[in-house]
Image: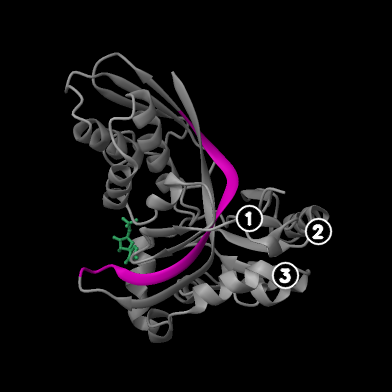
Amino acid sequence: MLEKASCCKVNLLLNILARRPDGYHELETVMHPVQVCDRLQFERGGAGLSLTCSDPSLPINSKNLVFRAAALFLKSAGASPAEGLAIHLQKNIPVAAGLGGGSGNAAATLLALNELFGHPLPPNRLMDLAASLGSDIPFFLQSRPALATGRGEIIEPLDFFPALRGTHLLLAHPGFGISTSWAYEQLDRFPAALNGVRGRARRLIRLLQTDLAAAAGEFYNSLQAPALHKYPLLELFQEFFRQNGALATLMSGSGSTTFALTRTRDEADDLLEKFKGEFGSSLWTAVVKTAPD
Ligand code: C5P
């Protein structure tokens, strides 16, 4: 049996540049790993491919990215159709939340199965499989911050950012999810958000080396335009975080999770207490250190 943690991400910047002829969107995004993790267990044996999940609302068939990643791996690795494989997914990361939980699960599945089957596929082949399963998945084959371009599948891994050392993230989920394809489809109504100017990601990466306050001012997400228009609660979260001292606040990915960046753990814990006082304590929240020391 092999067990793997599958953690999530936030986008510190997600700048959409144009709609592409293939229907996807050209973008530049700065993705940062976040240590809120699901757990996956893999065991060879039994008959066929089976998936179980701690969350009964999630599909356990080919609609689940873990199932799809496993089926694609077995086919690509030339495993016998009789090969039995049982996978269990313990879900902690909220779904349709902009945190890349499902994408991380798919990447962890590819990595785990390659290990379990004796490394039949080289890294570049795993990258291709990951990109074919979803735009965010290649990022999760590695565990560092990254600049992602193309439709999000071209990854340039980066060192952890010096300016974020010691900082913390407060993540807050509003209790509803947002569909990624819905968010992208809405961009027609927000032309400024659809046609961003290239270069913001590199500028942010440069500032993240030395200047926390200036970098925080550069956090940006094109997909906020449609999301905040439809869900004013997310705007209220952001106003609240700003008024209560967050260095920056942003929706992650296509939402709905919204995060606040603070200088210290104490500030993040204080902000969480105040957030609960304002919005109730039933919403999913997490406080994490942004980067390792
Ligand atoms: O690649 P993935 O399957 O995760 O994308 C989900 C949906 O998000 C796509 O079907 C597409 O509608 C939208 N998308 C996009 N441009 C991107 C990434 C995703 O339009 N760069």
Asked which secondary structure carries label 2, the reply is: helix
Extent of the magenta region: 22-40
Label disc, if present, on residue 227 of the rendered structure: none
Q: Which of marks 1 and 2 is nearer the N terminus?
A: 1
Contact, CB < 8 Å: mark 3 with mark 2?
no
| Residue at image mark 1 | 171
Q: Work out whether 137 lies above or below 206.
A: above
Per the image, the residue denoted by label 2 is: 267
Say which residue appears at 57% left-offset and 69% top-offset.
205
Point out the quarter of the image occupied by ligand 1: bottom left
Tell me the amino acid under the disc marked 3: Leu
Spot occupied by residue 63 in the image (x, y as percentages of width and height): 29, 42
Residue at 46% of width from left, 48% of height from top?
95
Residue 244: quadrant of the picture: bottom right
Per the model, the C-alpha gap separating discs 1 and 2 is 13 Å
- Alpha carbon separation for disc pair 1 and 3: 14 Å
In primary-sequence order, the first of circles 3 and 2 is 3
Q: Is the magenta stretch mostly helix, strand or loop?
A: strand
Q: Which amino acid does label 2 sit on?
A: Glu
Camera-near label (1 vs 3) is: 3
Residue of label 3 = 247
The image quadrant of residue 115 is: top left
The relative height of residue 226 versus residue 114 in the rendered view (above or below) is below
Mark 3 → mark 2, Cα distance in angstroms: 10 Å
- Above or below, 168 relative to 116: below
